[in-house]
Image (tube, helix red, strand yellow):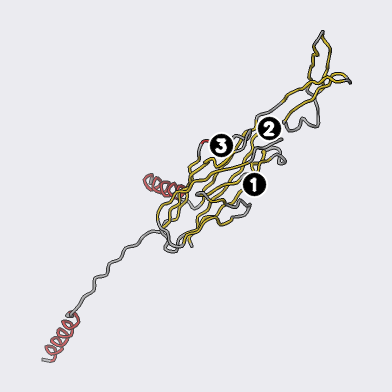
Amino acid sequence: MAKYLGLFLLILSSQAMAGTNSILVLRAIVPEVMKVEVKVDKNGPHAILHTNHKGKHHSMPKFLIKKHESHYLVSVTQP
Amino acid sequence: MKKFITALTLTTLSLSAFSATQADLILKGVVAPILDISIVHETVAGNLDLSQAASNVKVATLTEKSNYAQGYKIKAKSINGGKLVNTVDANSFVNYSLTYNGSGISLNTSPTQIYSTSNLKGTFTKELKISYSAPVNLSAGSHEDTVQFTIEAN
């Protein structure tokens, strides 16, 4: 009985391998970008967020900009 | 006497039936139909670089087998109609094109014939190559498409 079961499985396997369809799968991964650019103009410092993260566009991070001697310190808080 | 004559007649008739001046030998062989298509992916097919343009990058090799006298045809169908689409953001996609054995093919969401031969029999390999322009403003994540190739007898 087991012999016939093996033969049956072999036939099924052969049919699965010989087909009239083939699938080409194409895939690319875009890495996440999260970059904060700080610009200082006559209106003072302001931060610009560069991101490709889906969903973050509608909930912008909060920036807290503080002057520290000759630098600006920017802290980013994700909502 | 009557029985003897009857038996002799039947014997004569029987011998007549077996004797002839020709005999036919019938030989027959059956060739099973073959119609098969398979694909071997290149590693790059699953890891395309979308940070820059691509031109004729080999992504796979198709192997077609047929012994049909009238030849065969190949059809292709793209799930996303020739676009690599972000799996979570349908607005993020890259249009691409494929060549089949060096010739550009149409990538539609319904099966479209891309090749036909009227009498070729045997095993044939065809290279698949992808091209696309440098994408911009793509969402992070996986961008994918699946192309199904089908072989049909003519």
On the image, the x and y values in percent for residue B46 come to: 56, 37
Residue type of the residue flagged with mark 2 = Ala
Q: Is residue B107 above or below residue B57?
A: below
State how many labels appear: 3
The residue that appears at 42% across and 49% down in the rendered structure is A11
Q: Is residue B75 left or right of residue B13?
A: right
Circle 2: element type: loop
Q: CA distance from mark 1 to mark 2?
A: 18 Å
Q: Secondary structure at mark 3?
A: helix
At label 1, which amino acid type do we have?
Answer: Asn
- Nearest to the observer: residue B80 or residue A45: A45
User: Which of the 4 quarters of the picture holds residue B120?
Assistant: bottom left
The quadrant in which residue B34 appears is: bottom left
Check the residue under mark 3 and report the chain it is in: B
Residue type for callout 3:
Gly
Q: Chain of mark 2?
A: B
- Give whichever of B114, B20 is nearer the camera: B114
In the rendered image, which residue does mark 1 sit on?
B80
Give the vertical position of A32 relative to B13 (above or below).
Answer: above
Where does the N terminus of chain B fall, quadrant-wise?
bottom left
Residue at (62, 44) in percent of width and height: B96
Check if mark 1 and mark 2 are on a common chain: yes
In the displayed structure, B149 sits above or below B42; it is: below
| Residue reaching furthest to the bottom | B2
| Residue on which the image places disc 3 | B46
Q: Chain of mark 1?
A: B
The answer to whether B54 appears left or right of B127 in the picture is right
Is label 1 in a helix, a strand or a loop?
loop
Residues under numbered marks 1 and 2 in contact, where contact means CB atoms less than 8 Å apart: no
Query: Which circle marks residue B140 in the picture?
Result: 2
Counting residues from the start of the chain, the first of labels 1 and 3 encountered is: 3
